[in-house]
Image (spheres, rainbow, N blue to C red):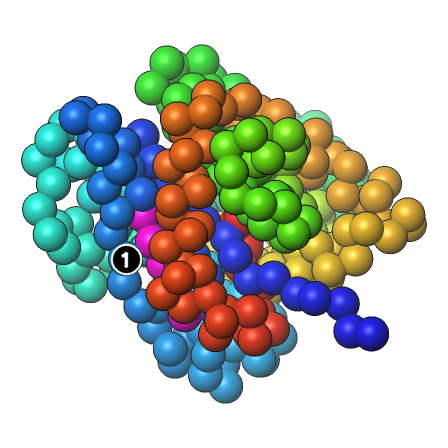
Amino acid sequence: MKEREFNYGGQAVIEGVMVRGGSRMAVAVRAPSGEIVVHTEPLNPALYQGPISRIPFLRGLTMLWDALGLGLKALMWSADVAVGEEETGKGFSEAMGWVSGAVGLVVGIGLFMVLPSLLVGLLPIPLTPLADNLLEGLIRLAIMVGYIWIIGRLPDIARVFAYHGAEHKTINAYEDGAPLTVEAVQSYPTAHTRCGTAFLLTVVAVSILVLAPLGQPSLPMRVISRVLAIPLIAGISYEWLRFSARHAHRPWMRPLIGPSLALQRLTTREPDDGMVEVAIRALETVLAEGGENDRRMEEQAVEP
């Protein structure tokens, strides 16, 4: 019998959760009044249901780009709701999504790809190509972990991480066939195999394998090669994330995904019941408006 596949993913936002299925997305946010405010809209069918969604490696790039834009738009909308200034559709313009996605992508590339390469390239001591790329990967990992650890100590970000935990718990419960009640959902773990944190760790590992054959180019070529290699690294990482999530229940896969699950302790917190209630509302909205189509989709989201 064919194993059931799931495509639900999303992210935490300010005082809420965004859930993305195969055909629709929904953002649920706790307003200052205590009411749960929900925004929903269809996803781009060309990206999520068209031929491009079935092309390995290429599909990862397009979906990651769209997910970045959706996530940033949802974050801005949630901020409006959190201060009681929400307006229907505000924060969800197409232009804003593309601009936000571009800015976030440039900052991420500079911080996690270019900076480690520059630091290793400026070292005055000679290194073998293998040691060179391993050191660059370790610096990249250290920057990523340090960044997450520092922002996680901010009270507002800690609350976002708690909503992240609520999102994971809710999707874990749904995928396990449990009822979507606060009591049932709270019994599930805050880690999930399709989490974006797992994707980041995968990118670090894949970058070492992809860049090692390039040896030790000059500093300008070093930076250029890292930027040009991003599509390949992202595509391979996305496919590995899909594969590992599909086989996460197999004993031989558990040691391979263990570090990714452990790293999620930095980006998740145990949520309170109210946070879980918000996450349930977001998932139930997606299920109600597009769930049957979503369950027929073969694609898996990057971040649950």
Q: What amino acid type should be assigned to the residue bearing mark 1?
A: Thr
Residue 49 spot, x, y in % from top left: 46, 79
Q: Start and end of the magenta stretch?
A: 23-27
Front-lying residue, 197 or 92: 92
Image x and y of residue 130, in percent? 79, 44
Mark 1 burial class by Cα count in 10 Å: few <14, some 14-19, many 20+: some
Residue 207 appears in the rendering: no
Q: Nearer the viewer, residue 293 or 78?
A: 293
From where the camera sits, is residue 131 visible?
Answer: yes
* Residue position marked by numbered label 1 in the rendering: 40
69 displayed left or right of 257: left
Residue 168 vertical placement versus 27 (above, below) = above
Please provide percent x and percent y for residue 202. 66, 47
User: What residue is at 31 percent from the left and 43 percent from the top?
Assistant: 28
Q: In the displayed structure, would residue 49 be above or below residue 232?
A: below
In the picture, measured across the screen, residue 1 lies left or right of residue 225, that is right
Of 136 and 183, nearer the camera is 183
Tag 1's secondary structure?
strand
For this view, does 288 lie left or right of residue 216? left
Residue in front for this viewpoint, 121 or 206 = 206
**84 part of magenta stretch:** no
In the rendered image, which quarter is residue 213 located in? Answer: bottom right
Residue lying furthest bottom: 51
Residue at 59% across, 49% down = 174
